[in-house]
Amino acid sequence: MQFLIYWREGLFGGFVFVTVVQLFYYLYFFRRLAFFSVPEKTKSQQHPVSVVISARNEAAELAKNLPGVLVQTYRTTHEVIVVNHNSLDETAYLLEELQKTFRHLQPVNLKQDAIGIPGKKYPLSIGIKEAKHEIILLTDADCIPASEFWIQKMQNGYNEETDVVLGYGAYHKKPGLLNKLIRFETFHTALQYFSYALAGTPYMGVGRNLSYKKGLFFRNKGFSAINHVMSGDDDLFISMVAGKHNTNVVIDQEAITLSEPPKNFNEWIRQKTRHYTTGKYYKPVHKFLLGLYSFSHFLFYPLFVAALVWYDWKWAIPAFFIRFLLQALVYHKAMRKLNEHDLFPWWWVLDLWMFFYYIIFAPAVWKKPRKTWK
């Protein structure tokens, strides 16, 4: 009988612990994105910008999305470099035709792969090397800027100390449950990397919308430290070079890029599995912070149910609703900032879904990655 009492108190103690941990993350980290306001700049400057895109057999995506990059409203000098990485489709022909209209388009045709360098780090390195300007702005062939002011907004994130600017890469809104799941997970990831950056501990960016200086890239010998990793050209590189004082975020609906979401659940699993294989290479402090948050998030609902059944609902429910109300406030404000507000009516269901998400994708941390990116 005494053991049963200790066991019940242990369950409730565990629930209180994970609730406190969750409250800490929302109050210390995530509120920074929810209540973010753009700091006033004493002076504004337009910098020359080189947009760099790596593409392999993506002629259809380039035909659909590249014009949105080429027609940006930006009066200062800029160029768009598309690295055609050994494509076998009509990518080269398409770029040649587009260049006749858009003189600032600079195709770079690669005819070989780099042995021992998987993923797109090699073509990106070539594109950055060919860039004429110091500020590099990265996106993907399947991305389109949400507005004609994408370049303007992203470069405006630079000041005298800035070397890295993080942007938001969203997915197109489409009908169906899968689209909501994908977009919520994307928002949830952005909630973390934006908030961590605002707290002075940046750990990743997304290659769909990311900027850094060419000098920073070469001072750190490019991707040489992570060439053996399939992915990592965005998160691992940013983890290495970004710091408290040299990193800014741009949170503006006109600075978002949009991509086509995976078409089915299996495609999404493959995509996320590839991305999560880089997690083991994060810095220890980042692995600890991300792991503690995910662990407490995963255990929150099971321990809440256990506390209701085995302890006392009069204590469990108030703790649950404190976290619920704080989470609702943060999600509401953060979703509006990232133009994901249509997800808010479903946030509590989507947050519950994350319990199953962790079960599905946790093995990706230990899974051996694929050797090719296309």
Image (cartoon, rainbow, N blue to C red):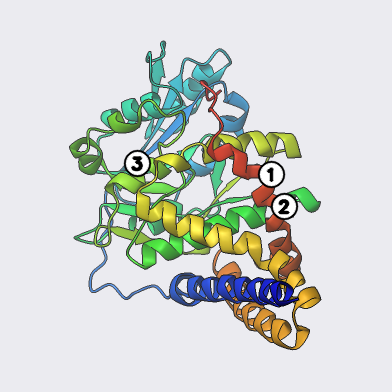
Mark 3 residue element: helix
Pick whichever, 236 or 359, lies toward us. 359
**Relative to 174, 231 lies left or right:** left
Q: Nearer the viewer, mark 3 or mark 1?
A: 1
- Spot occupied by residue 359 in the image (x, y as percentages of width and height): 68, 48
Q: Quadrant of the N terminus?
A: bottom right
Q: Residue furthest front?
A: 1
Tell me the quadrant of the picture where the C terminus can be found: top right
- Which mark is on residue 356? 2
Q: Is residue 102 visible?
A: yes
Apparent side of residue 143 relative to residue 128 in the rendered image (left or right)? right
From the image, tell me which residue sits under label 1. 360
SS class, disc 2? helix
Name which quarter of the figure residue 351 lies in: bottom right
Residue at the (47%, 15%) spot, across then down: 86
Residue 60 lies, with reference to residue 159, above or below; the image says above
Find the distance from the CA under tag 3 to the CA under tag 1: 26 Å
- Check disc 3: other Cα within 10 Å, few if <14, some if 14-19, many if 20+: many
Q: Which mark is residue 240?
A: none
Residue 51 drawn at (x, y percent): 38, 40
x%, y% of residue 191? 52, 62
Residue that numbered label 3 is attached to: 237
Classify 144 as above or below 60: below
Q: Residues within 10 Å of mark 1 (few under 14, many from 20)?
A: few
